[in-house]
Image (cartoon, rainbow, N blue to C red):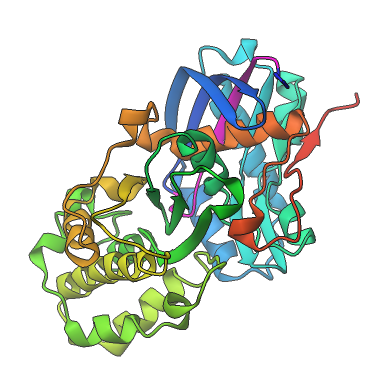
Amino acid sequence: MELYSKLLVLGMMSGTSMDGLDCLITEIQIKCFDKLKFKIIEKKSFNIPTKLRNGISKIVDNPQINYLSLHRKLGNYYTSCVSQLNNHAQLDLISYHGQTIFHKERIKSIQIGDPLPLSNHFNIPILFNFREADIKVGGTGAPLMPFLDWLIFNNSKFNDITLNIGGISNITYIPKNGIKNQVIGFDTGPGMSLIDECCLYFWNVPFDKDGGKSKKGKVNQKILNDLMKHPFIDLNFPKSTGRDIFGKKITNEIIKMHTGENPYNILRTFVAFTAKSISKNLYKIRNFSPLENRLFVSGGGVHHSVLIDDLKLYSGFKRLHDLNDVGVNPKYKEALLMAVLGYTRFNNVSNNMPSVTGAKNETVLGDIFINKI
């Protein structure tokens, strides 16, 4: 029976929504490769400075731009944030995702954020670059979340589905038998990305707080029907996408094609599109039924009441389950994922999901940066 030692790990995540950096310090131990124990020690979120966020957005829109300077600035920003955590001096490992600026499944995925300043400042192993190894063995490189979902739900005795609504939405299906190679996971399309970009375009605010603006609009059925024809929505899994596909470009295209439409109606339609595209992809799961599955929702989208109402309407779920019931704070789930991926990488435990990404075999995701100075 393999039992790995307890480690105090910091997981950091700034997702495709680009709205902030979530930091979670947790004590982790894994037994027999599939039994996860964790204890939350500290959690804190930091706003990403507007100038830094604008720089990221510019690179995402123009991936040919040299990003080395931004790579260094992000590394310094991460270091500054970690320094403000109360328990940073006790850390064994720091594990982070970095900011995705390019993702083309099975080809290449680029996350920026220099590990050097973190290593120089804290003098502990830094874990990063968690998508490349899966792509090298034929996988899509995303999503990563199904590994954590499987660890959490593999003994639940229910057919469970988790939905993370970040900038991009992704789902994981864990059958009640808990068998790893029967887990399904994939990106469904937009999460908050189009909603956020629409708010920036019309009102110069980064997001639709509590759905306040979209409540003023009505769904434009023609625009919704056109959006639902996007080829990614009907694509079979495994599949992954990014903000380069569902971000500023498509938002601006829709707005310019419908210049006479009320901005609130366009926003409301993006909300409906997000919910409907998620729901349509839920029905790709074999034997899916809202009566026979539990759906756990996390990510920034859980706070958007209009989106959640639309999700219930289109999916058929009358009740959405709370991750707090299984000991996971929904806001920090992605940060917990990074901590778990870092822990498993450090212990050389396979942490990709071939049944999700289509990889040819299991492998260990992530690089370890250790300062030799």
Residue 121 versus residue 297 in the image, above or below: above
Q: Would residue 347 be counted in the magenta stretch?
A: no
- Describe residue 167's horizontal placement relative to residue 254 as left or right: right
The image position of residue 140, as x and y in percent, is 65, 63
The front one of 174 and 253 is: 174
| Image quadrant assignment for residue 199 | bottom left
- Describe residue 366's horizontal placement relative to residue 292 as left or right: right
Q: Would residue 9 be counted in the magenta stretch?
A: yes
Residue 364 versus residue 220 in the image, above or below: above
Residue 60 versus residue 82 in the image, above or below: below
Q: Residue at x 72, y 55 (%)?
A: 134
- Where the C terminus falls, by quadrant? top right
The front one of 363 and 310 is: 363
The front one of 150 and 97 is: 150
The image position of residue 66, as x and y in percent, is 72, 62
Range of the magenta residues? 5-18
- Describe residue 168's horizontal placement relative to residue 77 as left or right: left
The image position of residue 127, as x and y in percent, is 71, 35
Q: Residue at x 52, y 21 (%)?
A: 38
Q: Residue at x 59, y 25 (%)?
A: 10
Residue 125 can be seen in this image: yes
The image position of residue 364, as x and y in percent, is 75, 43
- Describe residue 300's horizontal placement relative to residue 55 as left or right: left
